[in-house]
Every structure is written in C-alpha cells, then in structure tokens.
Amino acid sequence: MDRRIPVCLLAVAVIALPFSTALAQQTAEPAVLTIQVDHPVAKVSPTLYGLMTEEINHSYDGGLYAEMVQNRTFRSDWSGIRDWYLVERGQAAAKIDIDTTTGPSTALPHSLRLDVTAASAASAAGVLNTGYWGMALHPDTAYQGSFYAKEDTPQTGPVTVSLVANQSGKTLASATVSGIGAAWQQYHFTLKTGAIEPSAANHLELTVAHPGTLWLNLVSLFPPTFHNRPNGDRIDLMEKLAAMHPAFLRFPGGNYLEGDAIRTRFDWKKTIGPLVDRPGHPSPWDYFSTDGMGLLEFLEWCEDLHMQPVLAVYAGYSLNGEHVNPGPDLDPYVQSALEEIEYVTGGADTEWGAKRAADGHPQPFDLQYVEIGNEDNFDQSGSYDGRYAQFYHAIKTKYPNLQLIATAPVKSVQPDVIDEHYYVRATEFFHDADHYDKADRSGPKIFVGEWATREGTPTPNFGAALGDAAWMTGLERNSDIVIMASYAPLFVNVNPLAMQWTPDLIGYDALHSYGSPGYYAQVMFASHLGQERPAATLEGASARFFYSVTEDRTAKRIYLKLVNASSDPQALDIDFSGARLAAQGQVTTLAAPDTQATNTIEHPDAIVPVESTLAVRGAHLHYDVPGYSIQVLQLQWR
Ligand code: AHR
C-alpha cells in the first residue's frame, strides 16, 4: 500500500546518505534483525488503522462540526443565556429573556425573546454571540448563516447580521434580513469578509433599529466546509484526518453512546432530519450536544474520508449503572438498533432507508461491523451476556453478514470480534508491546477500539509517541488477529474550558489546529503498511527497541518500522534474505531530544516527520537508529 504522507506534513531533509553512520561509534554491539522477505507468515488487516471519536473535549461542537455559533438554540442556566449577550448601542434600550411559550418546532419549543423599547439606525439593539471561544474569520471568505425568527410587528426588523472584530469594534462583514413575519420561519444570509487578517477574536451580532419584540432560535453560521457539505466539517481537521489514512470510523462513542443515564444516551432518531427537529442532549462529558453531528453526518464523514462505518448501537447500559434487563424490557432497544442498521444500509424502499433518502442520502451505506454497547465490563449487574446475546440473535437473523463486536467477554454466544481498551503510560506499552504475540488465534478477532499512552497535555508529548509507536509495532505484528485499532480520544479544543480528558491526538482552537507527535507517529505507521508480515527475528537489541515489518508483494516493497525509545542509538545489522534490494530506500523520521518535547497550538511543527534517503548495498544493511526516534524505512526489492 503506497499511501505516502502528504508533503504538507513533512519536513524534507535533502541530505542523509548513508544514514547516521556518525552515531555508530557510540553504540554497543549491533543487534541483528533478520527479515525473510520471501517468507510471509501472516496477513495484515487492511482495516488495522482507523478513528474513534465522540463528543468529548468539544470534538464536534467547537471542533470538527464547523458551526461557529455556540449555544445556537439559546439554552440558559443560572448564569444566564450562555454565550449570548445583550447589545444596546447609543440610546437603545432592550432586554432579553428565554420565552418558554414559543419556539420554531416541537424539538425546540423555547426561544430567545428580544424586547426593544428604544432603537434607531444609529442606536441598534440586539444580541451578540461569542462563538466557540472566538469566531475564526479569513479574508475574502463567504460565511453561510441562518436563523429562525418571528416578530410582533413588521416594523421591528429588518435584522442586521454582522461579524464584528472584538478589539476594534469594526464590522468585518454584514447582511440585512428583511421581511420577518409573525410566524416562525427560517431566514438565510451570507456574510462575506474582505481583506482582513485571519483572526478568531470576533463575534456575531444580530440587531434591529426599531422598537418591538423579536423571537429567535437556531442561529447558525458556517464557514466553507470540507467538500462544501452544508452542515459540514472543518476543512483543516478533515485534512489532518485524511493524512492518517483511516480505514474505519467507530462512532458515536464511547461513553457518549451510553450517556450518563438511559434517557441521555445517544438516541439516534433524535439526531437525524432537519436541525430544527433535533433537540440535542447532554453529553456525559458535562456539556450539551447540539446533535448537529448526527447519524447521517457521521456516515457522510465516513464517505468523505473513504472509511468503513463501525456503528456502535446503544445496548441497554448507561454510565450511572442503569441497565435494561435482557428479555422483553430490552426488545425496544434491539428494535431501535435494527431500525438504525436499516437507516444506514436499507434501500429507499425500506421504511428507514426511505427516511435516509428523505434526509438527502438515497444511496445506502456499506456496513460490515456493528458494536453492541461500550465498555460493558463496567456493568456490575452481569446483564451484558444476556443483552449481547439478544442483540446478536436479532441482528444476525436479519443481517447474517454483519460482524458483531462485543465490548466485554461473553459466554452465551461467541462474538465475532471483541473490543479491548488500553489507557496506559509509555513504560506499560514498552512492557506490553508483545501483548498479542501469544493470543489465542481460534477465538474472536480483536478490535483495540480505544488506546493511548497517557502522557502530555493537552496533547501527547514525544515520550507518549514512543509508547504509542512501540504499541503499534505489536498491533501490526499481530494484525492477523487484531483487525482494527483506534486511538482515543482523537480531538481536543485546547481552550481550558473545553477539555475534559487529556491527552488527545489532535489539538485546535477556533482558528488553528495541530498534530501531536503521537499523531505523526500514526500518520507514519498507517501510511506505510503492507498486506503481509514476513518472518523476522531480532536478537541483541535494547529492551526499549521495537520493530515491525510488513511488505507489499505486488509492489515489491518492504516497510520497516523502527522505534528506539532509549536515549542511546541502537546499532542494527539487518539481513534481508530471499530478495535483492534496490540501491536506495526512503526513511521517514520522527525524533526529539527529550521525551517531554512536544507540539503546541503556538508551536505546531516542533516535531514533524522528516524525509531522507538511505543507501542499500545488496541484502545486508548496517544501520544506526538514533536515540528517541521513530522511523519508517521503505525499501524496494527487484
Ligand atoms: O476515550 C474516553 C473514554 O474512555 C471513552 O468515552 C470510554 O469508552 C473510555 O472509558
């Protein structure tokens, strides 16, 4: 698989031929790595590397989901209407409140009520929204907006919508929406910036110039999105994900699937259709989810990045310990899962396939894996065995080809796949990199659905990347049984108010994003993956040295991953038997002087992959792997 790292992610070293001989004197006796190129011993799963995400750390709202207005449906708490403030310019006088008697839909039964007692063209009154810790604006860019509104008299409007710079108060883009009626209706507008500096220190204002009462809800503003999808995703984050070459997306969670309680689970039917029909729900990570990123948006995300959906269905257990007993009590949840699968895979002639078509996607999605619940080992009631079996039989009866993933060991049926999670320190991954070497090959396949070296904040440091890379060598070596693996959590909005869990692979604020060293390690590993693992042995290496070798026999290419988690270089004598190698190979290196070195939102490129070349003579290579480095050698045979 020649899936090269995009040039934008690489620093290119033009020199380095041959590689690192200067370090040779410092190293001890070379370790001996023998690779039998003509002797493949195991298959590598084509779906090994994928993504797992959920609504945590403002992964979607304030993250991937490109909506710029925070609290667009005017939820309030003891502090007031969060993220919204009254605007009274000059002589204007107005007040705002939540009106619980009127809203644009059953799902959104409330609204913001703006009562204006004095306003004029020179003294506008209204509200402003501060966004997700700012609103990122770029020059010469069109922002698409909308809101639902009604007013008591036609004189109150028109509504002026403006993007305003926080520090200067300067209006950077503006539009007027007129003809607001007495009944709820949606209005659209476009805000176009001019020659401005990129900045997130901006806010959105909606104002009127006449006394009267205006009701508002679902105020929305989107920048250009990936593939120009309406209600779509941030381009910079999607590009970072694309560079990881993910084969699958596990969604919608995690704890986010389960909810704190049954009533706050991810209830997929409330996440589809027009936004005005989505009530949103509290995420277990202590903030409210708009559900703008709903079931169809997850699937379209898969479509955009050519990922297989790994659909996790709610299985009757929530984080507060509530569970649904197997048997008749569980039937509605099983039925909901069957309908969810039909929404994903059914033709437009099925009930739920027709609903998906009406939502804008007539083509069914390909689905091979369904996960039953999440981390059900926490269910102290012991009900998971029965719950899993009930889901298993119902789903297999209707969809015999689906592979069903269990989240904890079960006895009554043999699951197709088991999901196992690991959140550890780097040293634990160093000790456990051989975890699956002796795993039972006759049992279920393994999905490492969440894993991470937990070192560094808000994103993993280089020491964590070393732990991750060591762990990934073990996943690759055992990819005949480990068919999928996904790091978690994937995303963090680095604003301190946005984060619940650390570390997270990719960081961002409203304007910028960056990859951690762990992110680049994954880009390197997933971009260089063969279909088979050749026989290989390593003798005499330090305890902190790890490797993995895979090959693409059609392209006659070897991908050799070397992870040196020691500060000392590791000398290697590499013997390639059964093939004549081309004279030049490629090397991709991620290295740092210290385990605590890292990338940050201010210094996003401190540690990035560097490309170089390597001279190869015959079937033998003496090679010195630098201390604290992760490398991929790509070698061609003839
Ligand atoms: O990744 C964060 C959380 O860790 C997930 O929601 C949960 O499945 C796990 O415990």
Image (cartoon, grey):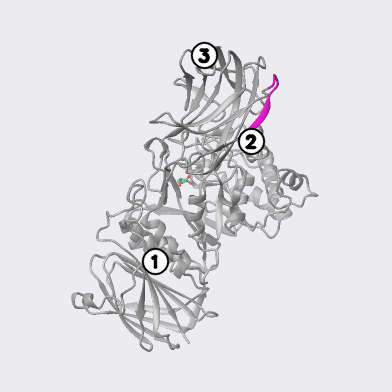
Q: CA distance from mark 3 to mark 2?
A: 29 Å
Q: Count residues near mark 1 (Cα–Cα under 10 Å), then give few for <14, some for 14-19, many for 20+.
A: some
- Any atom of ligand 1 within 8 Å of the CB at mark 2? no
Label 1 element class:
loop
Amino acid at dot 2: Leu
Figure quadrant of residue 249: bottom right
Label 2 element class:
helix
**Mark sitting on residue 94:** 3
Badge 1 is on which residue?
434
| Membership of 381 in magenta stretch | no
Q: CA distance from mark 1 to mark 3?
A: 67 Å
Badge 2 is on which residue?
275
Say whether disc 2 or disc 1 marks the residue closer to the N-terminus.
2
Residue, x 38% and y 59% (percent of image)? 468
Magenta part of the chain: 181-189
Residue, x 57% and y 28% (percent of image)? 73
The reply to whether residue 475 is in sight is: no
Q: Nearer the viewer, residue 152 or 340?
A: 152
Select label 3 or label 2 by which is in front. 3
